[in-house]
Image (cartoon, rainbow, N blue to C red):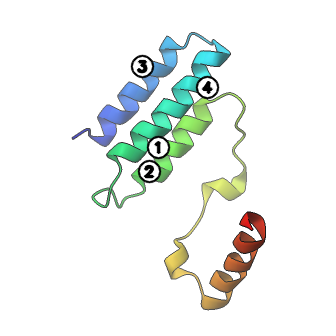
Amino acid sequence: MMTECDFYSNLYDDFLETRNDENDKILWKTYKIIDLMKISDDKYTSGFMENGLRMIMHLFKYFQMCSCDLCSYDLSDAPINEKEDLKLVLHKEFT
């Protein structure tokens, strides 16, 4: 099983191999997100997937992080009224 450190090391190495080619960067981003999803499971409860996604998107040129991406809380800890509001927004968005 790949460790978090190994994942980040491979992430940077593979990113450098793109040599600033936009098509290679798009493929790199897609494959790294898939790799992250494959190795992430319930064993990584320390935010590994979230941090990995942030790192991938941060390295990808067109993604801009905003301050709302830097702090969040677990939805399961949210009050019931916020969960209901979110359900309505998601329902409108995907139906």
The reply to whether the C-beta atoms of the residues labelled 1 and 4 are less than 8 Å apart is no
Element type at mark 2? helix
Q: Identity of the amino acid at label 3?
A: Asp
Lower sequence index among marks 3 and 2: 3
Real-space Cα separation, disc 4 to disc 2, in angstroms: 19 Å
Mark 2 closeness class: few <14, some 14–19, many ≥20 residues within 10 Å: some
Residue 60, horizontal then vertical, whole percent: 62, 30
Number of the label disc, if any, that sits on residue 52: 1
Instruction: Give the distance between the C-alpha atoms of the residues marked 4 and 3, in whole angstroms.
Output: 15 Å
At x 40% / y 37%, what residue is drawn?
Answer: 35
Q: To which residue does mark 3 refer?
A: 13
- Counting residues from the N terminus, which is met first, the one under dot 1 or under dot 4? 4
Indicate left or right for 68 with 78 as reference.
right
C-alpha span from label 1 to label 3: 14 Å
Q: Secondary structure at mark 1?
A: helix
Query: What is the C-alpha distance between the residues marked 1 and 4?
Result: 16 Å
Provide the residue designation for mark 4. 26
- Residue that carries the numbered disc 2 in the rendered image: 49
